[in-house]
Amino acid sequence: MSQHFSVISPVDGSELLQRSYHDAATVRATLDAANHAGRSWRQVSLTERKLMVGRAVDELVARRERIAEAITRQIGRPISQSPGEVRGLEERARTMIELAEQGLADVRPAPKAGFERFLRREPLGTVLVLAPWNYPFLTAINTIVPALVAGNTVILKHSSQTPLVAELFDEAFKAAGLPAGVFQILHLDHAATLQLVASEGIDFVAFTGSVEGGRTVQHAAAGRFIGVGLELGGKDPAYVCDDADLPAAIENLVDGAFFNSGQSCCGIERIYVHHRHYDDFVAGFVELTKAYRFGNPLDPHTNLGPMVRAGAAAFVRDQIAEALQQGARALIPAGHFAADAPGTAYLAPQVLVNVDHGMRVMREESFGPVIGIMAVDGDEEALRLMNDSHYGLSASIWTADRDAAIRLGERLETGTVFQNRCDYLDPTLAWTGVKDTGRGVSLSVLGYSQLTRVKSFHLKD
């Protein structure tokens, strides 16, 4: 395995930068430093930990322009949209800091004469965060902030596509004055990452990525009795009901399908529309899709850029081609988007109809700018199709009837149910999933649960 790695920018296919992987001695020293720092960090008051982590958030926000450029050059998201990730990370981080008192509070049973009894949450120790490239700050911040606030130390291993993100995190936490060893980063290849997962001294692993990646991480940790949080794939559905506000549904679902070139675990990947609205919905969806400005993400007028790499685009092209061979129909004509270029990361958005669940594009995660749309007769058919998936991260219901949304939502096999919105994480709510989407909970007051252990105190007078 090479000791170095390169980041190829999807903007133009050129080498953006090179970095060296950290060697085994550095990994060992990093882990030792984290374990040593943890003994004193956990003794720092919650108030002070919140203040220091809050200062790190301030430092990240102050680096907004550098963060935006790093995102665009490393993964290809349009520069007009990249600054929004800073708003998102700030919202999540400050929410989790605010929820810390509640999430870490003692739990006291009903009083019992002659005894004092309570349950106290304590930090686990050292938390390893394995973060992906697609939302590189948002996915990492979900664990980093509550882990540190709870008194854990953190080692961040970011995707090899986004090393600048790890370095910006490191810079911000150092500038905020966190003690040495409390927050550290490592650049590692896959083999070294799995070795670290299995190492004594790692007390929890938070992984965001593919299903196969999650299985590999879980297997590496299986020899030790530690927790593993896994946020994996998605094939998130939307159902446009008979009483939906059609213009609002079209506007939001086009964005939910194609923002970040569809490279979102909770992006919309399949849509079911009540047959009464089907023709009008499809016509409006195609019209809005055709209006996208697809091209170089460094152009401030662009609102849809390339995928992260040519190989990812080729995978989605294959899904589309296979669906067409099986009878699907493509509604965005070839050539409509001039920037589309087979063999590169530039893949134009595509809308498919005449699709069914025998096609990979309706069952297998695409993680790209393609959407399949089907007509349904009503709620029962929509529910059956929405649940016909190995994944279960989020699902959206487009209806004016709040009670109907709750009633349908109770029958959906998913971690989050949306009404009249999609592709968004409210940090006061738990982010979780079912089936192959993984296990564990991040965000919300419950996000502190998997990053701490419970100790019971049973005190007799």
Image: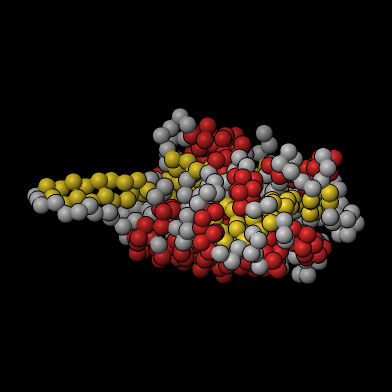
In the image: residue 251, left or right of residue 383: right
Going 64% across and 48% down the picture, which residue do you hit? 381
Please name the colour scheme applied to the rendered image: secondary structure
In the image: residue 98, left or right of residue 285: left
Q: Position of residue 299 (x, y in %)?
A: 79, 67
In the image: residue 132, left or right of residue 261: left
Q: Position of residue 446 (x, y in %)?
A: 41, 54
In-front residue for pair 79/35:
79
Could one spot residue 247 in this view of the protein? yes
Could one spot residue 424 in this view of the protein? no
Going 14% across and 51% down the picture, which residue do you hit? 112
Where, by quadrant of the figure, is residue 274 drawn? bottom right
Specify the quadrant that holds the N terminus.
Answer: top right
Question: Residue 294, relative to residue 372: is it above or below?
Answer: below
Going 55% across and 49% down the picture, which residue do you hit? 412
In the image: residue 81, left or right of residue 301: left
Where, by quadrant of the figure, is residue 53 drawn? bottom left
